[in-house]
Image: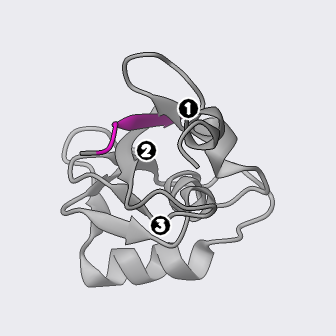
């Protein structure tokens, strides 16, 4: 079983885990995680993927927090960066540096280096 990781951007909080140990593993976001409803970053790199998730009902309006979306089921992204981009609505940053292990607080990229 893989360790769990957290990603936070503003009020959005997502939990997830890598799908395998590899240089660029796919990344699973857990049901119940939240995403920003209105992207705050200029670059909206994953806007098409976000729209696909909204259209399919995987991301829905949060029932009690107007500025958030809610994952209704698990979602598998192609990478930790894609997972982070879907949550925050874009941005050009390294997802492996922004996901942190739930217990130790270790960044995903450092955690992964120890296992490759």
Question: Is 79 situated left or right of 77 in this image?
Answer: right
Secondary structure category for the residue under label 2:
loop
Provide the residue designation for mark 2. Answer: 67
**Residue density around tag 1, few if under 14, some if 14–19, many if 20 or more, within 10 Å:** few
Comparing labels 2 and 1, the label whose residue is closer to the camera = 1
The residue positioned 51% from the left and 73% from the top of the image is 78
Secondary structure category for the residue under label 3:
loop
Secondary structure category for the residue under label 1:
loop
The alpha-carbon separation of the residues under discs 2 and 1 comes to: 10 Å
* 5 is within the stretch colored magenta: yes
Question: Which quadrant holds residue 23?
Answer: bottom right
Provide the residue designation for mark 3. Answer: 26
The residue positioned 68% from the left and 39% from the top of the image is 97
Question: Is 91 situated left or right of 113 in this image?
Answer: right
Residue 47 lies, with reference to residue 86, above or below; the image says: below
Provide the residue designation for mark 1. Answer: 10
The residue positioned 41% from the left and 36% from the top of the image is 5
Task: Where is residue 65? Give x, y as percent.
Answer: 31, 38
* 115 is within the stretch colored magenta: no
Which region is colored magenta? 2-8
Tell me which numbered mark, 3 or 2, is placed earlier along the sequence. 3
């Amino acid at each position: 079983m893989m360790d769990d990781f957290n990603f936070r951007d503003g009020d959005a909080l997502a939990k997830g885990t890598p799908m395998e140990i590899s240089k660029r593993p796919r990344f699973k976001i857990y049901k119940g995680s939240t995403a920003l409803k209105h992207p705050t970053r200029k670059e909206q790199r994953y806007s098409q993927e976000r729209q696909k998730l909204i259209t399919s009902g995987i991301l829905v309006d949060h029932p009690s927090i107007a500025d958030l979306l809610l994952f209704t089921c698990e979602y598998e992204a192609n990478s930790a960066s894609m997972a982070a981009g879907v949550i925050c609505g874009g941005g050009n940053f390294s997802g492996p540096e922004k996901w942190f292990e739930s217990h130790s607080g270790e960044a995903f990229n450092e955690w992964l280096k120890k296992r490759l």
